[in-house]
Image (spheres, helix red, strand yellow):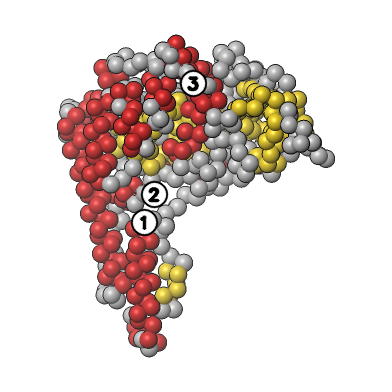
Amino acid sequence: MIKIRGVMFRFRPSKLATAGLAMIAASSLIACTANNSAQQANKIELVQVNPDPFPSQYKSLPSQPTLITNVTILDGIGGKIERGQLLMRDGKVVAIADMNDEITQLKAGEKVQTINGAGKWVTPGIIDVHSHLGVYATPDAHSHADGNEMTKPVTAAVWAEHSIWPQDPGFRRAVAGGVTAMQILPGSANLVGGRSVTVKNVPGRVVQDMKFPGAPYGLKMACGENPKRVYGKKSGPSTRMGNVAGYRQAWADAQDYQRSWDKYYNDAKKDKNAKPPKRNLELETLAGVLAGDIIVHMHCYRADDMGTMLDVMKEFNYQIGSFHHAVESYKIADKLAQEGVCSSMWADWWGFKMEAYDGVRENIPMVHQAGACAIVHSDSDIGIQRLNQEAAKALSDGRRAGIDISKADAWQWLSANPAKSLGIFDQTGSLEVGKNADVVLWNNDPFSSYTQAEKVYVDGALVFDRNNKDTWPVSDFEVGQTGEGDIK
């Protein structure tokens, strides 16, 4: 809020609005000598766009101060402590220590639960940047297929959070695999699919109960075969060049929309009878990307498609956060490092369609070795339950190819790098003092296929305990109908 000539104005916190705000504030200083009656006559009320009409209602679950001791710690940013201690209190990581250092060794205070982690490992919680849980919910019925608005090539107006069904049992199965947060995306049929949302993996009655506070929105876009297949026999696009024409026209329209709001704010500054533009929800989201408020996540397999999209990114001056399903990132890893664009990849999925054909199992370690931001993602309600094993496969393949990466560095693929691509690394993604206590205690080395998540904490609250079935979260949908293989 700012007071100008006695009138309170509220602006959306984007670069666009910030510029307009600065201009109007400057004009108010120049006009400070105007008399009060003129001020009243010229009083205007700017149309304001609420940047957060569906705010997070997340409240952390009750937690108990907990000290995990005598445990191997991977901090998620390349550090490893063989005999470590980690103390959580009030939802935060408050101390990490090496038990071999008697000076810094932590002592459990009163009312602190102590867990002897001998033989066990602690890591940051896994963050999956590509999930459709809730929008393609289990059971996999047509009634639950709410993830693809396949009505036209550009549907930037839709928001994934308006399709998410919080009762999807997949959320609870993912937490048993150590997943503490995830990005829920719309599907990949369209050139521009719509807004994604980042959620904490906690039970909620409505999606706002799960929404990660302060996380930027994402925008799902897709390259290559999917838009061609869906729209090729309709109005198009039917080719890759048609795809690119569609992206470029959408961005050009967004620039024009942005300019119309610039003009409105400038006219208001001059006390003209300014008329606000009509809101366009599709262009509003695209303009949000151009303003730097929304992060682009692109489904792209081939290296040449990714290279083209880097050029489009530069033409319209926005930033791609991550390419997803990027099976050919190894071919352009140096370019991705140079442009600061992450690659979200599978360990060994490839060949299920032509654009996925040239995958290699060393993709993730090769991207890492080039200094680019490598991420392991799932795009699967099953794969999300075992992402630690996906990272283990990629690490093993890299080492066989002569790429020597430590387990401590490799864990970045599952926590720090995903958090960076989602714009939440200041809050989570690594075990550092002051960050959210999103923590997994594994019953052994998490790079072993025999290892399971034993305890999972979100903001320091125990949300899963493998040794206490009474604590296993159960969806309302599952009450009275136990899933196959479940014990509830």
The residue beneath circle 3 is 405
What whole-number distance in Å separates the C-alpha atoms at marks 2 and 3?
Answer: 34 Å
Amino acid type assigned to the residue bearing label 3 in the image: Ile
Instruction: Give the left or right position of residue 111, taking residue 246 as reference.
Output: right
Q: Is residue 131 above or below residue 484?
A: below
Percent across and percent down for residue 252 are 21, 48
Does label 3 or label 1 sit earlier along the sequence?
A: 1
Q: In which image quadrant can residue 145 be found?
A: top left
| Front in this rendered view, residue 270 or 481 | 270
Q: Secondary structure at mark 2?
A: loop
Percent across and percent down for residue 12 are 41, 59
Q: Residue at x 70, y 25 (%)?
A: 83
Mark number, residue 191? none
Q: Residue at x 29, y 38 (%)?
A: 192
Instruction: Give the left or right position of residue 64, taking residue 32 as reference.
Output: right
For the residues labelled 2 and 1, say whether their Cβ atoms are less than 8 Å apart: yes
Q: Is residue 189 above or below residue 401?
A: below
What whole-number distance in Å separates the C-alpha atoms at marks 2 and 1?
Answer: 8 Å
- Mark 3 Cα within 10 Å, few/some/many (few <14, many 20+)? some
Percent across and percent down for residue 256 are 22, 54
Q: Secondary structure at mark 1?
A: helix
The residue beneath circle 2 is 293
Amino acid type assigned to the residue bearing label 2 in the image: Asp
Instruction: Give the left or right position of residue 469, taking residue 21 as reference.
Output: right
The residue beneath circle 1 is 15
Q: Nearer the viewer, mark 3 or mark 1?
A: 3
